[in-house]
Amino acid sequence: MSLTGESSGGVALWRRVADSIEQSIADGTYARDTKLPGETEIAELHRVNRHTVRRALAALAERGLVRAERGSGTYVEAPRIAYPLRSRTRFSEIVGADGHTADGKLLNSTIEEATQDLAKRLGLKTGAPLLRIDALRTADRIPICVGTKWLDAERFPDGGKIYGKLRSTTKLLAHFGVRDYRREWTNVSASIADAADAARLDLALGRAVLITDSLDVEPDGKPLLTTRARFAAERVQFVIENS
């Protein structure tokens, strides 16, 4: 076993270990969310020391191929879905274009009064009735984001029930005669998932979520709906595109 783990044949040993693990991920030996063998087992397999193994795993983590969970071990990461933020942002289209099957699930729908901020976004009066829709979006049945949408309740009566049947915002709007709409703006931030979102997204407590606050409008610029979505940060990669 190597005592230094620094080089062999001109190639750093940690890189050889990293390359070997990456190949095993690529050929399916280690599938998504598979727990990798422990450091000692990997070290014995490659005849290197544990310091070399740690460096190899750190390099793989930096590239998004694996993730370390404290007290549990190291797991294979699924490739992140490239998620463009652009004037036409449709979850089903984006996920489908990446070769995945998109779906949605209604979590809850209620009628609530518009706060000052929501009313301003939607061009309504403070206190106006809003339809609130909470939904989970998935790709190949893997939870990707939890979204909360607000729409004018008077314009979209029974919108929650209709979304529950159609499981698509685009189809919901089409049901009410809205054939096209565009993204007016999107603000992006990040946070730690709260307990409810972590459970819905199947994330360990303490994992990060990417948050988008956005406004969608009709072609003539009339406000249509506003959304606050929480994405599992380890499953998507936002791509900012110019309009």
Image: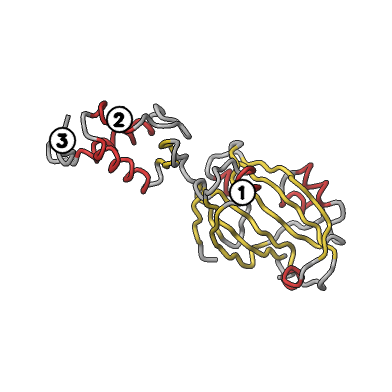
User: Which quadrant is home to the C terminus?
Assistant: bottom right
Which disc is residue 3 wearing?
3
> Which residue position is annotated with label 2?
40
For the residues bearing labels 1 and 2, Cβ distance under 8 angstroms:
no
Q: Amino acid at mark 2?
A: Thr
**Residue 111: quarter of image:** bottom right
In primary-sequence order, the first of circles 3 and 1 is: 3
- Between the C-alphas of marks 3 and 1, the distance is 46 Å
Q: Nearer the viewer, mark 3 or mark 1?
A: 3
- Would you say 122 lies left or right of 102 here? right
Judge by depth and name the residue closer to the eye, 178 or 223. Answer: 223
Quadrant in the rendering for residue 222: bottom right
How many residues crowd mark 1 within 10 Å: few (<14), some (14–19), many (20+)?
many
120 vs 125, left or right, is left
Q: Which residue is mark 1?
A: 145
**Image coordinates for residue 150, horizontal then vertical, percent:** 75, 60
Q: Position of residue 133 (x, y in %)?
A: 75, 53
- C-alpha span from label 1 to label 2: 36 Å
- Asked if labels 1 and 3 touch by Cβ distance under 8 angstroms, the answer is no
Left or right of residue 12, residue 28 in this image:
right
Amino acid, disc 3: Leu
